[in-house]
């Protein structure tokens, strides 16, 4: 019986040693892999800003402003028929007080894009 017990203890110790070695190897591989992953940074959270899903970071970016004046009406629902309507919406939304000249200049700038 003591020979069997000695054999079982030896096998158990060998298995524990093997588990320890495997754990060390896995941790080493994990460290190597993590150190070689390049992290992407962005200021455009895209769809993730709306739904909170990490894998949606940077997806669905906002429209470009090039050719803006040719794409009326504006907003997702077409509620701003002109660039001046869009300017006035944001003026109200953000509590701005633009003069008529400022509004005109901003519309002229947006039209030039």
Image (cartoon, rainbow, N blue to C red):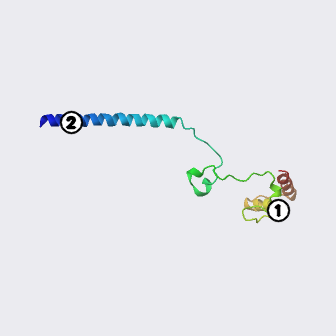
Q: In the image, 92: left or right of 31? A: right
The residue depicted at 24 percent of the width and 37 percent of the height is 12
Circles 1 and 2: CB atoms closer than 8 Å: no
Q: Farthest residue toward the left?
A: 1
Q: Residue at (66%, 48%) from the top-left corner?
A: 44
Of residues 68 and 87, the one nearer the viewer is 68
Q: Is residue 58 left or right of residue 100?
A: left
Q: Tell me which corner region of the image, top left, top right, bottom left or bottom right, holds residue 25.
A: top left
- The secondary structure type at the circle numbered 1 is loop
| Residue 35 falls left or right of residue 40 | left
Mark closer to the observer (1, 2): 2
Query: For mark 1, what is the residue?
Result: 82
Q: How many marks?
A: 2
The tag on residue 73 is none
Give 88 or 55, whichever is nearer the viewer: 55
Dot 1 or dot 2, earlier in sequence: 2
Q: Residue 14: percent from the left, percent from the top?
A: 27, 34
Quarter of the picture holding the N terminus = top left
Residue at coordinates 82% horizontally, 59% vertically from top-left?
83
Q: Residue 65: horizontal and vertical position, in percent? A: 77, 52
Residue 85, position as x, y percentages in the image: 80, 63
Q: Residues within 10 Å of mark 2 (few under 14, many from 20)?
A: few
- From what the image shows, is residue 80 above or below residue 42? below
Which image quadrant for residue 11? top left
- Image coordinates of residue 98 in percent, x first then y, are 82, 57
Helix, strand or loop status at disc 2: helix
Q: Residue at x 61, y 57 (%)?
A: 50
Label 1 crowd bin: few (<14), some (14–19), many (20+), radius 10 Å: some
Gap in angstroms between the C-alphas marked 1 and 2: 84 Å
- In this rendering, position of residue 12 left or right of residue 72: left
Residue corresponding to mark 2: 9
């Amino acid at each position: 019986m003591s020979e069997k017990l000695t054999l079982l203890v030896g096998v158990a110790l060998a298995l524990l040693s093997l588990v320890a070695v495997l754990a060390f190897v896995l941790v080493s591989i994990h460290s190597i892999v993590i150190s070689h992953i390049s992290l992407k940074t962005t200021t455009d959270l895209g769809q993730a800003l709306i739904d909170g899903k990490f894998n949606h970071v940077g997806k669905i970016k906002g429209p470009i402003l090039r050719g803006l004046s040719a794409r009326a009406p504006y907003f997702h629902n077409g509620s701003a028929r002109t660039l001046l309507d869009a300017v006035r919406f944001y003026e109200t939304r953000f509590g701005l007080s633009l003069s008529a000249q400022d509004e005109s200049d901003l519309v002229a700038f947006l039209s030039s894009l």
